[in-house]
Structures are given as C-alpha cells and as structure tokens.
Image (spheres, grey):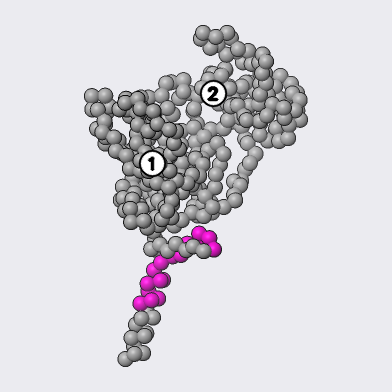
Amino acid sequence: MKKTIFIIILILYFLLFSSCSKVFLDDNEILVFERNSLRIAKKIDYTPDGLEINMKPFDTNLDDYVYGYYFINLDGETYRYQRDALNVENLGSIEELVDEIKFNNPGFNELHYKVYSLKEYPDHERLQLRCVEYPDNRYCIKYAPPLNDVEFTLSELKDDDFVIIEDDTLSFGNTIWDNFIDKTKQKSKAIVWICYLSTKPGMDKLYDTQPPDELIQVTKGDYPKMQLVQVYYDGTQYISSPIHKVNGEYVIYYRKGYDMTEVVFKYMIHIVDELDSNRFSYSSRERYVLSDEENLTTEWMYADGPSGKGKIYPLVNYRIIFTDYK
C-alpha cells in the first residue's frame, strides 16, 4: 500500500513539473510559467547582419531642409539626411562639394547650406556621412534610412500573445493585458509583450488631428512603424525593454535611433481621464504609466493637463505603456 501511494505521488510530481517550462533569469532566480504561456525574453549582446548602409533614393521633389531632414541631391538622385551628434572637431577634412541647399524660412533670411563629402573621418563611407557648412557653423549629417521596421505581421504577433496598441488604441489582447494587471495586483511576477503600431506620423488621437501633407511626404517609408516591448514585473519593480525576434526567439537588445530605451520604475499607475464629448471624439482615455511617483496624475504629467488648473508640479520621469480610448 505504501509503495502504491509512493508511486502515485511520483507520477503526480512528474506530471506537475513536466507541464511547466523553466526560464532562467540569472544564477539565483528561476521563473516558472505554464507551458504555452508567454516566455521571458533574455537580454543579449547582438549585432544585426548587414551593417553596411545601402542608400535608397527618396521619392520626393523636396530639395531643402524640412522637419529636421536635409534632402541632398547626389548624382541626380535625392537622399534623406539628418544631423548627427559627432563632434565637429572630429570631422576631419572635407573633400569636395556635393550639393548646395537654399532654405527659405519665412521671417528669416535665406540660409545657404553647402554639403561636402568627408575625407578622413573613420567609417565615413560606411555611415554615409557628409559635412554641412553655412555661415559660422559646420556640422555632420548622416543618411537617414526608412524607419519602417515592421518585422512581423499582426497575425504572427497575435499568435505570440502580444497586446497590440494601434495608434493609441487597444486593438488586440484585452484578456492578456487583464491577466498581467491581475498578477501585478497580487504582487506576483508577471510579463506582458506589447506591440505599439503607428500608421501615420504626427497623429493626435485625443484631438483627432491628421498630419500635414508635407510631413507625410518627409516621412515616406517610415510608416507603418512597430515597437515591440517586454514589460516585466519582478514583484518589486517594472522593467520595460525593447525586444526583437532572433533565430525564432524573442530577445532584448537596443537599436539606437529605432527603439525605446530600457527603463525601470517602481510603480505602475492606472489613470482614467473623463473627456468632454463636446471637444473630443471619445468619452474617456485609459492609460497605465510607469513612474517612481506613486501619485502621478495627468495634470502632473503635463503640468496643467486637460483640466487647465495650471498647478506647477516638480518634474517627474514616466513612461506610458498602455493607452486606450473609448
């Protein structure tokens, strides 16, 4: 009899732990999740293939400085550039004039930019750097490739249990999100993967504004745009990290100029704003915000916010991770 009970216990033990998968975070911590549930993405050192920049001509009739971009004519084709943070002292010598831009700014004098190729700066050919000069100033610009980085179809992300927020509105994953919230309320470790999908530049969901035609033209090839994020609650703090799929696995790594940086905050604050139906197309806005300030409010986030109270608050860091309008 005792032997039979012992065998039954062993079988139950085996069934219990074989139905779980273990994810190792570090030498001291193990997370256990039910099989087929969301896995945690590991942080890795990763350099994507194809570092060489293959410049693509920009289909536009723009030939000046617009919305922070320079449109440079090289060998009869127009390319989009943007200012780089390189120290002007490290630019090296300029080699030859490649283009000239006249920028007409209403209310100001005409600016005449001269664009040169660089001769000595390391990697200038690979990075497609150029030097811009105009009276009393010199700085570096770099080729600005299209930022359309849609890595997956929405159906793939849905299969991988992502919460999808499209243009500041929840479009998929309500149950997944609710399960994440429930676990955090219980102070249990929890993970959610979020896809932020933007379809147009400069949209304001609250005021239902559309981007100007010139901005749409400047950002051709940048949209639709996806940001994939993992939000991990370890029982004491929230860690929001950019994730990508590498060799079939979601991993954490940061691409400068493309991804949101990793942040760590103590609290996740739930904020629901009732909206004036006479001013807005929606009756309410729901957001979850990460911050170290537990009593964060909309007015605090935006100084005087939609209430217009005008109260001055101390500066506070935060990140909005979930938005939905109703």
Q: Is residue 140 left or right of residue 266?
A: right
Give, as a single range, the part of the protein colored magenta: 12-27
Q: Position of residue 98 (x, y in %)?
A: 69, 20
- Whether residue 110 is in magenta: the answer is no
Asked whether the viewer can see residue 228, the reply is yes
Residue plotted at (37% across, 38% down): 296
Query: Mark on residue 68?
Result: 2
The residue type indicated by label 1 comes to: Val
Residue plotted at (23% across, 24% down): 278
Asked whether the viewer can see residue 224, the reply is no
Query: Mark on residue 265?
Result: none
- Circle 2: element type: loop
Where on the picture, by quarter, is residue 108?
top right
Badge 2, how many Cα within 10 Å: few under 14, some, many 20+? few
Q: Is residue 176 left or right of residue 101?
A: left
Mark 1 vs mark 2, foreground winner is 1
Q: Which residue is mark 1?
A: 289
